[in-house]
Amino acid sequence: MSRKMTIADVAEKAEVSKSTVSQFLNERFEYMGEETRTRVQNAISELEYQPNVVARSLKKKSTSTIGVIVANILHAYSTQVIRAIENVCNEKGFSTIICNADDNPEKEKKYIETLLAKQVDGLIVVPISGNLETYDKLLKQNYPIVFLDRLVDGLNTDTVLLDNERASELAVSHLLKNGYEDIAIVTTSLVDNVTPRIERINGYKRTLEANGITVRPEFIRGMELNSFSQGLDALFSLDKKPDAIISGNDLTLMEILKYTFKNDIKIGKDIGLITIDEVSFGPIHSPPLTTIAQPTFEMGTEVATILLKKIKDKEIKDPVIHRHEPSIIIRNSTKKEGVSSE
Amino acid sequence: MSRKMTIADVAEKAEVSKSTVSQFLNERFEYMGEETRTRVQNAISELEYQPNVVARSLKKKSTSTIGVIVANILHAYSTQVIRAIENVCNEKGFSTIICNADDNPEKEKKYIETLLAKQVDGLIVVPISGNLETYDKLLKQNYPIVFLDRLVDGLNTDTVLLDNERASELAVSHLLKNGYEDIAIVTTSLVDNVTPRIERINGYKRTLEANGITVRPEFIRGMELNSFSQGLDALFSLDKKPDAIISGNDLTLMEILKYTFKNDIKIGKDIGLITIDEVSFGPIHSPPLTTIAQPTFEMGTEVATILLKKIKDKEIKDPVIHRHEPSIIIRNSTKKEGVSSE
DNA sequence: CTGTTAGCGCCTTCAT
DNA sequence: ATGAAGGCGCTAACAG
């Protein structure tokens, strides 16, 4: 088992000083003769030398690594966005460390600390509520950080997110156009005022009102994942039942589908369904699911790009909120005729 | 913007030496008096001091970080297993860096190098073919590494994987019992001899033969993701068509479902379907999908545990192959009566 | 062009 | 019980 090679070994083998090797590694070839250069090159390959990035990071005070903390990795949105972020980072020679806070503010806090201790150069976070002071302190220090998907109350900073009101506007309009009138919106827990959920409900209300339809509070439901069954029972036991549902996200969709499956409610026919966030089986479900999609790839690309720019320039700019446009994919879950695939 | 605190700042504030602070950080309280200890404690909290793990890693020659390289993150299997790995690591104070090789050996190689340069303490990898020498060298140096899901040809080392033959045995037996006789198996590309695919086909053949059924080579198809459409066309144009299909993995399943959807082939009724690897929509698909499931959580937990043990003990043991038992979840895609949900 | 030097922040004998 | 000193592997002035 060969000992790990260091810059000193290379220097000795190439009969130059450590600094020259270091220059070589950092591609400052101006500082050495042609012949020295090849000697170093050869020494490196013969010894199979690999620089130690830990040592380099310590010296340079920069790790070329960013941290990404997502609120909940179970959302397809998270994984899609992460892939885009990794793409950008890879291209620019940055590594990413992904952390899943599991909707738990404690965990989020712990990850922030671990990542900072690891000296990551910046942070992308899909925030949960509850760590306002931590973020505030970081921002005051001008530490590079960009938020994604959610606004943090009381924080004025760069954020990339969907035009959520527009998302539900698209959904409601499409449902109305297709003859549905009693539209409910259901989503996951509202207790933490998670931006997309709140804004999607606002957009829902606004669009209904704009169409002269009275908003029925009992048609708006935010519930914990484990109480969907009762919640939907309640919704379907109303005197005036909804004839269409907007699902606020993919986790919600799964619960709705479980429910309609169990209770033999036919989507399209018995109830219209539109879901926000594209899921893998959207196109092959029976019936195929009309979907409001986010441009996840662009959003991921943009957060990463913004963060890397911040890290590089480190000049202080005014924070800006980047809204992305949702799009509608019209399929059959919003056709009353039902299951037909055409 | 406050400068980052170091051990020296703490030492000064607490009026002790750097070494004492270091002892404190490493919880060697025997080496200091009660009173010193609280002084240090206070200094740390007042300064909001956070140790720099980069410096610590350099000195200790260990990063408390492991690398995980998966062949393709798009498999649900990857993400499930990763979650289990992260659980174990978190508990033991280790971080994980996840890399997706995208079925590309070059990328895999690059990630190995990057991770080693980052001085990760060990590696978990779902290997693609083509990096045999790299792995071989690492193993010879007794570098901690554990493989997952796939055997590497010509490498004798610790590996955690499914009893793949048993998986297709479960599938075939169940189909036969339910009256299907002409069973095909389709999966993704066979060119790289990816272990699960090969073994699942072997198990399929073996079980058919054990039941006195002649194996038809035209019922065995491994294809690239982008040519499923033609491949399935060919399969369904056979004089003797299959009456049931075993889907080798989740990506394959999506292609099959797209195909049957487009061609209006009714699963269960027109063709039986069993899929290996549980997917999110398995239970709510119409009809619900009979599935061979892997114990992904246990598998992830086991690889991580084995790796961490290796890192800790660093004694050389004989490599062992850990096979896990698949299980069958019987649902309706293997009932000829078709779509009914009961 | 090349080498010398002085750290980066922390840990670890070894003295005291 | 505490401190001094050396060094992990690399970088970056600054000399030469």
Image: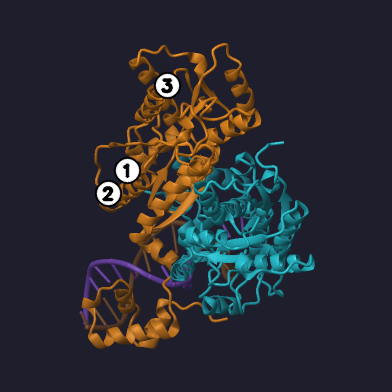
Chain colours: A cyan, B orange, C purple, D brown
Quadrant in the picture for the C terminus of chain A: top right
- The location of residue D9, given as percent across then percent down, is 43, 56
Picture layout, residue B57 above or below residue B299 = below
Q: Identify the residue position indicated by label 3 in the image.
A: B179
Q: Amino acid at mark 3?
A: Gly
Picture layout, residue A45 above or below residue B19 = above
Q: Identify the residue position indicated by label 1 in the image.
A: B142
Q: Nearer the viewer, mark 1 or mark 3?
A: 3
Q: CA distance from mark 1 to mark 3?
A: 52 Å
Are discs 1 and 3 located on one and the same chain? yes
What residue sits 61% from the left and 52% below the top?
A27
Q: Earlier in the sequence, mark 3 or mark 2?
A: 3
Picture layout, residue A20 above or below residue B217 = below
What residue sits 44% from the left and 69% below the top?
A110
Please name whichever residue, A237 or B100, is drawn nearer the observer in this view of the structure. A237
- The location of residue B337, given as percent across then percent down, is 49, 29
Q: Identify the residue position indicated by label 2 in the image.
A: B314
- The location of residue A300, given as percent across then percent down, is 64, 56
The answer to the question of whether label 1 and label 2 lie on touching residues, with beta carbons closer than 8 A, is yes
Residue A144 shows in the view: yes
Q: Amino acid at mark 2?
A: Lys
Q: CA distance from mark 1 to mark 2?
A: 8 Å
Q: Secondary structure at mark 1?
A: loop
Quadrant of residue A315 within the rendered picture: bottom right
Are discs 3 and 2 located on one and the same chain? yes
The chain letter under disc 2 is B
Quadrant in the picture for the N terminus of chain A: top left
Seen in the image, is A135 located left or right of residue B161? right
Q: Earlier in the sequence, mark 1 or mark 2?
A: 1
